[in-house]
Amino acid sequence: MEIVPRLNQKKRYPWNIEVYPYLQDHHFEGKVILPAVEVLIVLAKVVKINFPPINISCLHKARFFRFLSISPDTRRLEVFVDIETTDDGVVVASLLTSVKSKTGTISRTVEHARVEFAAADSAPSFVPPFRVVKKLEGDYISVPSTTIYRELVPFGTAYQNIIGDLSVSPEGALAYLSGGGNEADEDLLGSPFPLDAAMHAACVWGQRFTDIVSFPTGFEKRVIYQKTKKGGAYLGRVVPVKVNHESLIFDAWIYDLDGIMFESISGIQMRDVSQGRLHPPQWIKADL
């Protein structure tokens, strides 16, 4: 274990990801995939073990390049984490797998995700007052969570963490979020489920106003002020920042029900990763 990382060094660490049953509830086009929020936990864990002084509550420039699929009988995923340090105190962590050719004679390394952990937050994020975010402006519709997870974001029970109705207007989306449960690790970055559910809200917004079924492909900055907890209740607000046919960009905030800020996430990037194979149902589309 290294107490202080040496500058401008890169090192590769082998790692095993335990595949708990609840992960089977996260799937795309018939394949189970490791959620982006779980990828971040893996990267944070390897960084914290090897570089204990690093602050893992401020994440920058997250990128999710390729899905990491989980085969039905898999109990443990063998991966690698590359960690690189820089002169300005940033630690860059990448999640990789080794993929063999069909003949088994050639292998190559595939990068699935990357994130930076900053030593300090030199530019604090804008945090809107709770009294502002809990009111959604503009004409909105309410979509029951049962409908969301049946028709718009068809994940299994473990990843159905929008609670009650989701309110959606041109100004954004607002929902109560559950801290979830199961064997998810909440010790380092908090429960993964509230942020995951906030991105579901962004996906629904995109389906209504852009005719795109989108998945997260990254974010610019995530600051964890307090860790969300499994079994907890939260309020999530999502705001569109930049929208075009290539990508949808959102900011999001997660509060507890007393108005205490827990997470701020800016520059969430959402894209259609199905190459046009998926389309929203007609009923969700707004008459623009």
Image (spheres, rainbow, N blue to C red):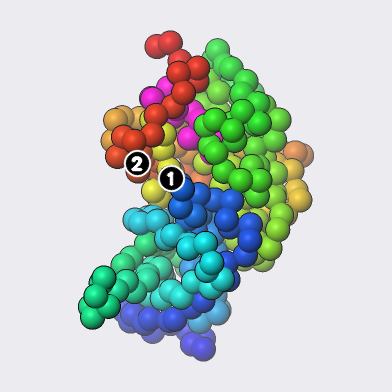
Residue at mark 2 to residue at mark 1: CA–CA distance: 9 Å
Residue 237 x/y as whole percent: 58, 34
Residue 8 x/y as whole percent: 31, 79
55 and 194: which one is in front?
194
| Residue hosting label 1 | 29
The residue type indicated by label 2 comes to Ser
* Quadrant in which the C terminus is drawn: top left
Instruction: Please give the range of residues in magenta.
Output: 200-211
Residue at x 69% of width, y 50% of height: 180
Q: Residues within 10 Å of mark 2 (few under 14, many from 20)?
A: some
Residue at x 71% of width, y 54% of height: 181
User: Which numbered mark, 2 or 1, is in the foreground of this view?
Assistant: 1
User: Would you say residue 212 is visible in this rendering?
Assistant: yes
Q: Main secondary structure of the magenta part?
A: helix
Horizontal side of residue 17 vs 242, given as left or right:
right
56 and 82: which one is in front?
82
| 206 inside magenta stretch | yes
Q: Secondary structure at mark 2?
A: loop
User: Would you say residue 92 is visible in this rendering?
Assistant: no
| 58 inside magenta stretch | no
| Residue hosting label 2 | 274
Q: Residue furthest bottom?
A: 1
Q: Secondary structure at mark 1?
A: loop
Residue at x 74% of width, y 43% of height: 233
The residue type indicated by label 1 comes to Glu
Q: Residues within 10 Å of mark 1 (few under 14, many from 20)?
A: few
Q: Are marks 2 and 1 in contact (CB under 8 Å)?
A: yes
Horizontal side of residue 201 vs 99, given as left or right:
right
